[in-house]
Image (spheres, grey):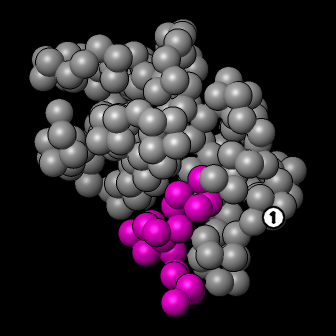
Amino acid sequence: MNRQEAMILLKEYTDKPGLLQHAFAVEAAMRAYAKTFGEDIEAWGAVGLLHDFDYQRFPSEMDHPYRGADILREKDVDEDWIEAIMGHADYTGVPRRSRMAKTLFAVDELCGFLVACALVRPSKSLDDLTPKSVHKKMKDKGFAAAVSREDIRSGASELGVDLTEHMAFLIEALRPIGDQLGLRMITP
């Protein structure tokens, strides 16, 4: 499945702007890590786009991402992709064996948290967001309370990267699509 096909499937099941923005953020993060790791950038990007494609229609833990996995299997999507998508939801119990699966888990929650951090900055931009300010927001349990800090920490650990470096890497990966994420671009 190429990006265009993944985008068609995503938009067939998802029309909420926030969910689409999250898909684009995770896609950008996955593409950046794929490039760093020497992996298939297009495949990793498509997995990022599709990881929550079923969530709007099937938001319960009983359905998501199980329904999405069934739909992907009907479309003959690679089982490695499906395993990564299943593994991004800890409650499925699907082990994250591949680098792709570990990366998806590591970027998912943190992408949403980074966007939330940027939105409360005076600049409303990723351009001046730093890991130091992200760490500070992680300590504030009332900020973006639905985001699992434990998933963010364990995701970096499973991927074998330092959390601060992981934050910096993702901030850089998301900056080029800041406007697509509803954030201001302040760099020339």
Q: Residue furthest front?
A: 38
Q: Is residue 177 magenta?
A: yes
Total labels: the figure holds: 1
Amino acid identity at mark 1: Ser
Q: Which residues are magenta?
A: 170-188
| Image position of 106 (left or right of 165) | left
Q: Residue furthest bottom?
A: 188
Q: Percent x, y for residue 103?
A: 54, 32
Q: Is residue 22 above or below residue 62?
A: below
Q: Nearer the viewer, residue 166 or 117?
A: 166
Residue 182 seen anywhere in this rendered image of the structure:
no
Q: Percent x, y for residue 3?
A: 21, 45
Residue 34 seen anywhere in this rendered image of the structure:
yes
| Image position of 155 (left or right of 107) | right
**Residue under pointer 1:** 133
Quarter-of-image position of residue 120:
bottom right
Q: Classify the position of the N terminus by image quarter.
A: top left
Residue occupying the point 51% across, 74% down: 183
Q: Is residue 134 above or below residue 179?
A: above
Residue occupying the point 34% across, 35% down: 40
Q: Is residue 74 magenta?
A: no
Q: Is residue 65 above or below residue 83?
A: below
| Image position of 75 (left or right of 137) | left
Residue occupying the point 81% across, 64% down: 133
Q: Percent x, y for residue 49?
A: 34, 43
Q: Nearer the viewer, residue 58 or 54?
A: 54
Q: Residues within 10 Å of mark 1 (few under 14, many from 20)?
A: some
